[in-house]
Amino acid sequence: MSQDMLSGLLLLGVGGGGCRLAASVAAAYGGGLRALGVDTDAMSNREASADGLTCLLLGGARLAGQGAGGDPIKGRLAAQDDFENLIPHLQGVRTVVLVACLGAGTGGGATPEIIRALHGMGVATFCVAMLPFSFESEARRKAAERVVSLLDEHADSLAVVPSDDLFEGGADRPLEEAVRAAEAALASGVTLLWRLLTRPGFIRADPERLHAQVIGGGACGFGAAAASGPERAARVVQSLGRCRLLRGGERLAKAGSVLLGILAGPDLRLAEVGAIMGAVKGLCRADCPIEMGTVLDAGYEGRVEVVALAFEGGAARASEGRGELPLIQEPPVAEAFPIQPGGRKGGRAKGGSKLAYGATGRGKFQNVEPTMIDGQDLDVPTYVRRGILLER
């Protein structure tokens, strides 16, 4: 089984913009990242598939592959129609990282619906939502802002990224070059969880704590910085503190917890790790817990990159509302991202239930050969396959 499968992570692009970004992020990771796209536009799906992303069509019977036409209600209904088609792709998944562009129909309508359905299955969600450019219409901006409130209510962790910030410093570049730089910045933050779990260096991040940060994260900001040459450790943290995506260090200063990745080649020195950690601690509150891991990759020879996820919530939030239920027992493959019941802001139902089937939805059938009829696993309860939320 691949390291990516063992991580229990899935990257999910929602809508045309989300699918394009997911394909770019998967490509930037260097292959082997478990990724999926969903959209109501058949043409968009074909384009993303050409870029190497597996894509599913939502609302085919309702919209005939013509897209949601900017109508979030159509996007939401399309997700309700066909969420069950995602179930076979969720086997072994503990955490889904969603990428969506807001302001249009599918990204704005389907993303909150998919997150709600995933929570009904006990899957943790980290949503990266792109806001429209400032030069786009007022209607798109307001539509995006309305969706943000829904995502904030249901996603375990939510990073809202203004497109203007992602393209920082790219206004004077050729468009293709600016797009590549923006996609690289996005990929640095989105793939950090994968890198820390599947490509660790000599300081490995604790999977349990990473999961706790996602579950209790709330609002999140991310940023990255790179440096090479003499004094690279000091200079990379200085650049991180000026990162526009982190609001010039404001996100770090107010964070309840921070996930930090140090990406470097085999020339990384222990003294540099200590210098980076000391400088980052100086940017954060004294009581802010920092979970750190290193990623050693020959491709980073001669330079150091630091990637930070600054979460509003701390580790304590992960236990809020979770005392009523025992942990669901899963086989060893679940060790990277074990699911804990409950959720933030009432997003997940509390109270005991015999209907808890864990992140895979297979419960005691986890290690049994599936009973497949017409592409559906009949060992998975119907309410799970169809994404139906049951009253406790």
Image: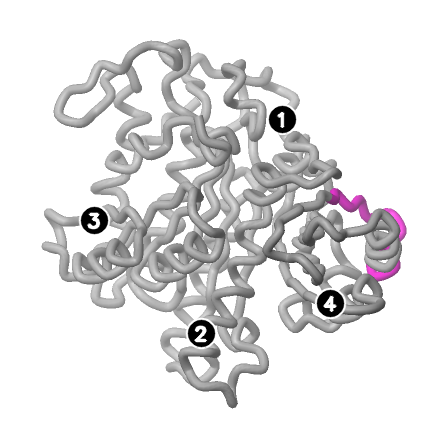
Q: Residues within 10 Å of mark 3 (few under 14, many from 20)?
A: many
Are the residues at dot 2 and dot 3 in contact (C-beta closer than 8 Å)?
no
Mark 2 or 1: the one toward you: 2
Q: Is residue 244 magenta?
A: no
Q: Amino acid at mark 2?
A: Val
Residue 336 at what x, y percent from top left? 57, 29
Q: Earlier in the sequence, mark 2 or mark 1?
A: 2
Distance CA(mark 2)–CA(mark 3): 26 Å
Residue 182 at what x, y percent from top left? 50, 70
Q: Earlier in the sequence, mark 3 or mark 4?
A: 3
Residue placed under numbered mark 1 in the picture: 322
Q: Which residues are magenta?
A: 281-292
Q: Earlier in the sequence, mark 2 or mark 4?
A: 2
Q: Earlier in the sequence, mark 2 or mark 3?
A: 3
Mark 1 or 3: the one toward you: 3
Are the residues at dot 1 and dot 4 in contact (C-beta closer than 8 Å)?
no
Query: What is the number of the mark on residue 179?
Result: 2
Q: Quadrant of residue 198?
A: top right
Residue placed under numbered mark 4 in the picture: 228
* Nearest to the observer: residue 52 or residue 73: 52
Q: Earlier in the sequence, mark 1 or mark 3?
A: 3
Residue placed under numbered mark 3 in the picture: 57
| Residue visible at 41% across and 29% down in the picture | 121
Task: Kindly state the secondary structure of the residue where label 4 is placed.
Answer: strand
Q: Earlier in the sequence, mark 1 or mark 4?
A: 4
| Residue visible at 80% across and 44% down in the picture | 289
Relative to 97, does residue 162 appear above or below in the rendering?
below
Are the residues at dot 2 and dot 1 in contact (C-beta closer than 8 Å)?
no
